[in-house]
């Protein structure tokens, strides 16, 4: 029988700042949580990815967490249940073994293609003693609105109600004996085959007060969630090439980072995890970027299915099509299509390992970035067969994007990396304007825009001529970051990926060599660019960029160097954590993960590079 032990008077569990790689992702395709290998949920936003946090111990000591773990010393190992994003952690103690299962409830949708459609914004947790005896400690400390609120805790027969601010949190649990200072704690002595179940429900003040989950309902909801993820994986994942499990897992990560109601994909589940420990390069990535569109389309095609690709494209066009025609296209949107993402600092949070400021919102939302025209039109080109007959409004929108690229490509902008320094004539921005026109010409029939083709082709040739002349720097032996600069930028690797030049072109091969010689760190990973050039207007440095490393692997494969591509690819993959998740960057000095987590871009790069290597190896085998 489970025995409940009094923890009143015992010091609360101390939450410390763990390595980023110590966390695993939970998602219901509306919002996300991060749970540590010690069973502590240190990041949770409800009801959306970009909502204020409920738990944010990741960014501040008194910003909330929810821990379920053995008492005393223990070791742990963990894995996602096969085909799912449901986490299972095994705790080993001196007296026994316990198994913790964590998930965000996805609900039971009648349509298996709409995973998470009926998600009730609920976290599910189950702890089972599988051998011997184990004492399990529970510490529940909600701190809504990024730690600003200490809620009022009201004991219920089957749990605890936390009230404060704009929402209620209902914890369904066995009796918790100690309630004090906005925190609930308890310890349970468990014997073999005994289980305890917990659920955390979120509701707005305007909603009716919810009914606690019974132990049986939580058990059933966990089973339904596991089965729903597995059913989605079986229906949607057919890739059967090299690194099959990595590719399929990355596809599920991208699905977990997608906002089901709209099809938006967030760049990452977190805000303000730094690009340098103690540095200021801390951004909110819980939004959806237009620049990701074309990369994402290809990755979803390989690792998920066309349904997800079409949903993401539908979101992007719906969000962007309302932009004023006399203004540049906005580069990013809220996951519900919101345009105003004004940035602010949260002074109450000291940041991961003291990395301040902690920001919400993202000031890059109103930057000028000319690459977005090419990314949306390239996405449309990839989906051309599925899109079929376009509505007049979407036809006009896409054709007008090409016109904007033709009209604006000569302007300076902030570039793909959203620099906060002076705008420049960035090579990548010009390149993507060329892509916009190239894809528009190829889509002219579907766009009912044959009368514009000559003008588009003329502008496309102008860009090609100028980029070939001013983008190439013979002294550097490479295509460089911006016109007149000798500095390298890994974004030049996109030249063959988008089809501007073949990967075997001598200038592309020379750029490949230059990137490896001048942007590669001692671990064999690629930096975006050299931060000491001052181009980005920010102090400090950053880690090596996993997406850029995967780009290098992809281009090496396209250049018929699949063996070398494999080496680069596997170096990047080796930095995934124990459950296969990748952050944005890697600290060159110690190999630790840096930046927001998990990062969609990194998993997108993994999928696309794996696909390119497969294609290269097939070509080599055929010849």
Image (cartoon, rainbow, N blue to C red):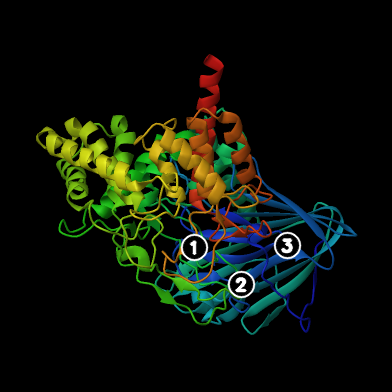
Q: Is residue 344 above or below residue 525?
A: below
Q: How many marks?
A: 3
Marks 1 and 3: which is nearer the front?
1
Q: Position of residue 124 (x, y in %)?
A: 61, 57
Give the residue displayed 50% in from the left and 48% down from the top.
548
* C-alpha distance separating marks 1 and 3: 36 Å
Q: Position of residue 428 (x, y in %)?
A: 36, 49
Give the residue displayed 30% in from the left and 67% down from the top.
340
User: Reading the chain from its start, which is encountered first: label 2 or label 3?
Assistant: 3
Residue pushed farthest front?
475
In the visual, does 217 lie left or right of 319? right
Give the residue displayed 90% in from the left and 59% down from the top.
95
Q: Which residue is mark 2?
A: 57
Locate the N terminus and report the quarter of the image it occupies: bottom right
* C-alpha distance separating marks 2 and 3: 14 Å
Q: Nearer the viewer, residue 226 or 409?
A: 409
Can residue 463 be spotted in the picture?
yes
Give the residue displayed 34% in from the left and 50% down from the top.
427
Contact, mark 1 vs mark 2 (Cβ under 8 Å): no
Q: Which residue is mark 1?
A: 531
Q: Which residue is mark 3?
A: 38
* C-alpha distance separating marks 1 and 2: 30 Å
User: Reading the chain from its start, which is encountered first: label 1 or label 2?
Assistant: 2
Contact, mark 2 vs mark 3 (Cβ under 8 Å): no
Q: Position of residue 401 (x, y in %)?
A: 21, 47
């Amino acid at each position: 029988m489970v025995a409940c032990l009094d923890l009143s008077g015992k010091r609360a569990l101390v939450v410390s700042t763990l390595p980023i790689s110590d966390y695993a992702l939970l998602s219901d395709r509306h919002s996300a949580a991060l749970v540590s290998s010690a069973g502590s949920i240190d990041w949770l936003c409800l009801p959306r990815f970009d909502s204020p946090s409920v738990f944010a111990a990741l960014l501040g000591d008194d910003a909330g967490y929810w821990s379920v773990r053995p008492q005393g010393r223990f070791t742990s190992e963990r894995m996602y249940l096969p085909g799912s994003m449901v986490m299972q952690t095994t705790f080993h103690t001196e007296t026994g073994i316990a198994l913790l299962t964590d998930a965000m409830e996805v609900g039971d949708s009648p349509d298996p293609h709409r995973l998470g459609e009926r998600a009730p914004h609920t976290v599910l947790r189950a702890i089972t003693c599988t051998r011997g005896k184990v004492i399990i400690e529970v510490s529940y400390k909600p701190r809504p609105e990024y730690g600003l609120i200490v809620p009022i805790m009201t004991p219920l027969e089957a749990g605890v109600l936390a009230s404060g601010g704009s929402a209620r949190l209902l914890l369904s649990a066995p009796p918790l004996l100690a309630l004090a200072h906005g925190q609930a704690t308890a310890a349970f002595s468990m014997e073999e085959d005994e289980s305890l179940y917990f659920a955390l429900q979120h509701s707005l003040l305007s909603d009716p007060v919810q009914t606690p989950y019974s132990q049986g309902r939580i058990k059933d909801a966990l089973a339904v969630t596991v089965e729903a993820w597995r059913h989605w994986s079986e229906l949607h994942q057919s890739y059967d090439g090299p690194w099959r499990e990595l590719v399929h897992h990355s596809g599920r990560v991208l699905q977990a980072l997608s906002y089901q109601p709209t099809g938006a994909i967030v760049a990452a589940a977190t805000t303000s995890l730094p690009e340098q420990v103690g540095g200021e390069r801390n951004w909110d990535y819980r939004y959806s970027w237009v620049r990701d569109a074309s990369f994402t389309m290809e990755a979803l095609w390989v690792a998920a299915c066309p349904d997800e690709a079409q949903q993401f494209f539908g979101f992007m066009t719906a969000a962007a099509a309302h932009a004023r025609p006399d203004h540049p296209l906005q580069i990013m949107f809220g996951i519900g299509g919101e345009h105003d993402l004004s940035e602010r600092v949260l002074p109450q949070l000291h940041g991961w390992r003291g990395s301040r400021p902690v920001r919400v919102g993202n000031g890059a939302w109103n930057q000028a970035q000319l690459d977005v025209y090419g990314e949306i039109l390239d996405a449309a080109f990839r989906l051309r067969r599925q899109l079929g007959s376009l509505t007049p409004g979407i036809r006009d929108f896409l054709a007008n994007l090409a016109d904007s690229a033709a009209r604006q490509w000569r302007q300076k902008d902030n570039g793909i990396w959203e620099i906060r320094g002076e705008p420049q004539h960035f090579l990548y921005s010009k390149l993507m304007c060329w892509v916009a026109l190239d894809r528009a010409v190829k889509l002219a029939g579907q766009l009912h825009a044959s009368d514009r083709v000559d003008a588009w082709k003329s502008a496309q040739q102008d860009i090609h001529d100028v980029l070939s002349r001013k983008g190439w720097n013979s002294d550097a032996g490479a295509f460089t970051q911006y016109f007149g600069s000798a500095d390298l930028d890994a974004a030049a690797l996109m030249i063959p990926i988008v089809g501007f030049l073949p990967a075997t072109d001598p200038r592309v091969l020379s750029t490949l060599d230059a990137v490896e010689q001048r942007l590669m760190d001692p671990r064999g990973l690629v930096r975006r660019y050299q931060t000491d050039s001052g181009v980005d207007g920010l102090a400090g440095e950053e880690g090596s960029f996993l997406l850029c490393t995967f780009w290098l692997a992809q281009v090496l494969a396209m250049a018929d160097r699949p063996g070398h591509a494999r080496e680069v690819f596997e170096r990047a993959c080796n930095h995934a954590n124990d459950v296969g998740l990748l952050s944005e960057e890697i600290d060159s000095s110690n190999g630790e993960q840096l930046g927001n987590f998990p990062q969609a871009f990194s998993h997108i790069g993994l999928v696309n590079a794996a696909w390119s290597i497969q294609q290269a190896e097939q070509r080599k085998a055929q010849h």
